[in-house]
Amino acid sequence: MYTIGIDLGGTNIVAAVVDEKYNIIAKAKTPTAMPRSAEEIFDDIAKVSKQAMGDAGITIDDIESIGMGTPGTVNKEGVIEFANNLGFDHVPAEQMLKDRLGDKPVYIENDANCAALGEAYAGCGNGSKNFVAVTLGTGVGSGVIVDGKIVSGVNNAGGECGHMVIVVDGEPCTCGRKGCWEAYASATALINQTKRAMEEYPDSVMHELAQEEGKVSGRTAFDAMRRGDIAGIKVVDNYIKYVACGLINLVNALQPEIICVGGGICNEGETLLRPLRRYIESERYSVYSKIQTKVMKAELGNDAGIIGAAILGSVN
């Protein structure tokens, strides 16, 4: 039997047929094309799901369950209570999928949690039951798996590690707090840190690199650092300290088997991961434990959320 995994994003809707070994058999996508109604969006979700099944050469009768990852908060009844970038307010997602695809078991979960589940079972986690996924992107996304289950909390909003404070009264965060990990460790934060350093160091090679690329990006400071640029080295060193601070907090609080780091910044590979591991080794509370948390690069890329959504039924 197969399952359907759906990744509902602000830019694209992607659906895939996934087999019992977590392999994607067929995949289809369409633009989310916001703003528009939930009914129109769910019509397209059904459309791409049927297209994926057709490309896989199967029908809905071959599908065991349907899972979907979505931005926002989802309750236990399969209702998307709020997703601001989709304009969703108490959208009965589970029922809307059943109405369009048939009365199959349907599971709805936050997209970051789905990505964590996908990496834990089918990616770098290799079946790990205690696992944390952290995505360094526009914000800092995260998902926590304990004993093989997604940690969602009493109100289904758990696992938001990006909004733990690492600097009291620090940089303002988009959530309304100050000093959140996201305000220091996201790709957005790195770009802002790079721009401030460029103002302070007008002779930095970062100016040349940004001009060549046409913008300041998450790579600018790292590329400058590799060329021996003092300003670039300072930006990268400070940024890695901020990322490490949050990771050490997670290690000390949760002691997971693996912390998976994803997002565009993780393309720096060992340039990023090696110093992060050193910080964790020097500051972790479990200094004498024989088993220690491993820090690894995400493996599944954009497929993590789709695969995680597809296997929601097997872990619920």
Image (cartoon, grey):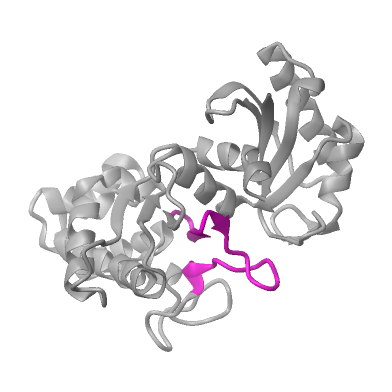
Q: Is residue 78 above or below residue 13?
A: below
Eyeballing the image, is 18 above or below 146? above
Q: Is residue 83 above or below residue 209?
A: below
Residue at 44%, 54% in the rendered image: 135
User: Residue 11, can we see it?
Assistant: no
Left or right, 6 with reference to 189: right
Q: 118 or 231: which is nearer to us?
A: 118
Locate the N terminus by quadrant. top right
Which residue is rendered at x = 61% and y = 50% of the image?
111
Q: Within the image, what quadrant is residue 250 found in?
A: bottom left
Please say whether residue 153 is one of the residues in the magenta stretch. Answer: yes
Task: Choose top left, top right, bottom left or bottom right for residue 305.
Answer: top right
Relative placement, left or right, of 193 versus 34 is left
Q: Position of residue 78 (x, y in %)?
A: 80, 54
The magenta span reads 136-163
The tally of labels here is 0
Whether 254 is drawn above or below 303: the answer is below
Asked if residue 150 shows in the view, the reply is yes
Image location (x, y in percent) of residue 233 = 15, 61
Q: Could you say which is closer to the camera, residue 300 or residue 240?
A: 300
Estimate the x, y position of residue 5 in percent, counting from the top left: 66, 35
Residue at horizontal 7%, vertical 53%? 228
Q: Is residue 151 magenta?
A: yes
